[in-house]
Image (cartoon, rainbow, N blue to C red):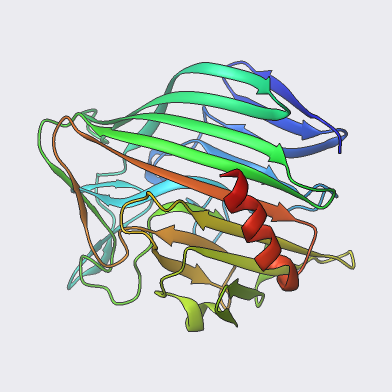
Amino acid sequence: MSHLDIRHDIDSAVTVSDGGTELFRYVYRPDSPQLESPKPYLHPIRTRAGHLVSLYRPWDHVWHKGIALSLPHVGEENFWGGPTYVHGQFYVQLENNGTQSHRRFTRIERVDGAAELVHELDWSTQGGAPWITERRALSARLLSDEAWMLTFDTELRNVSGADIAIGSPTTKGRENAGYGGLFWRGPRAFTGGSLVTAEGSGSGNDMRGQRHEWMGFAGRHDDIDAASLVLMVDDSSNPHHPPQWFARSEEFACLNPAPFFSEELTIPNGEAVRFRYGVGIADADAEAAQELAVAVRKSL
């Protein structure tokens, strides 16, 4: 296995590469419109063979951007993007699209073969009120000749001056739409792919809302005869573990361990909550999911 390289484009993005392959670009100062709730994101994301496994700003949901920490209901604020679900009115465009702003990096370095970033952010409402401060740690490491993993570790501290309840459209009344949290949007070619867990596999309609400690998405690429696997593992210490999962495959490819799917989580003023995830990216199909989940869990 080769080693990972880090390139920092000041005031823009950090790119982590595996030899000649850029595994991901972490854009920490996006130029997103306010309506899209500006936030850092990872895109493009590639396998070790260089195959693209993320999608940026799709026409159906322009606020979907690769992998991003996206929360639609943070109190009355929207850090997801676009309209807000209002029960009885469906989705309404409100002036509540908040921003996750870069403050500083406290670490960008290679450690024992891994590429590590530690990032501090300020979450503010569309009106400019401070809402949350975040310490986010990202780490990338190689697992095998076919796979690598991303660790995403975040601590969210409530600085709003009041308790904040984090929820989803489902906690607001929309059935089986409990999205929110670490969210991955896959390539168009992955539409119709397979979701896989330790208990079995199926479509998004089959699996959405189920509880699992990990879930993978296996898809095939256009142009090339290849399959890729994206898999997320929920750390056992996360609130509401194991999470319900928000996933789609019929309309488009997405995967999201959703800790607030059907139950709100309240962060008291001045206190913090922590979430930690492992994301495995492999040049493989669904049959490799169990082995990849074990390797990610071991390294998480």
Q: Quadrant of residue 92?
A: bottom left
Residue at 19% across, 33% down: 271
Seen in the picture, residue 129 relative to 63 is either above or below; the reply is above
Q: Quadrant of residue 69?
A: top left
Q: Position of residue 54 (x, y in %)?
A: 65, 53
Q: Observer-nearest residue: 44 or 30?
A: 44
Q: Position of residue 11 (x, y in %)?
A: 56, 18
Residue at 31% across, 52% down: 239
Residue at 51% across, 24% down: 118
Relative to 300, 266 lies left or right: left
Q: Quadrant of residue 87?
A: bottom left
Seen in the picture, residue 158 relative to 284 is either above or below; the reply is above
Q: Position of residue 130 (x, y in %)?
A: 23, 27
Q: Position of residue 269 (x, y in %)?
A: 13, 34
Quadrant where the image shows the C terminus? top right
Residue at 62% across, 51% down: 296
Quadrant where the image shows the N terminus? top right
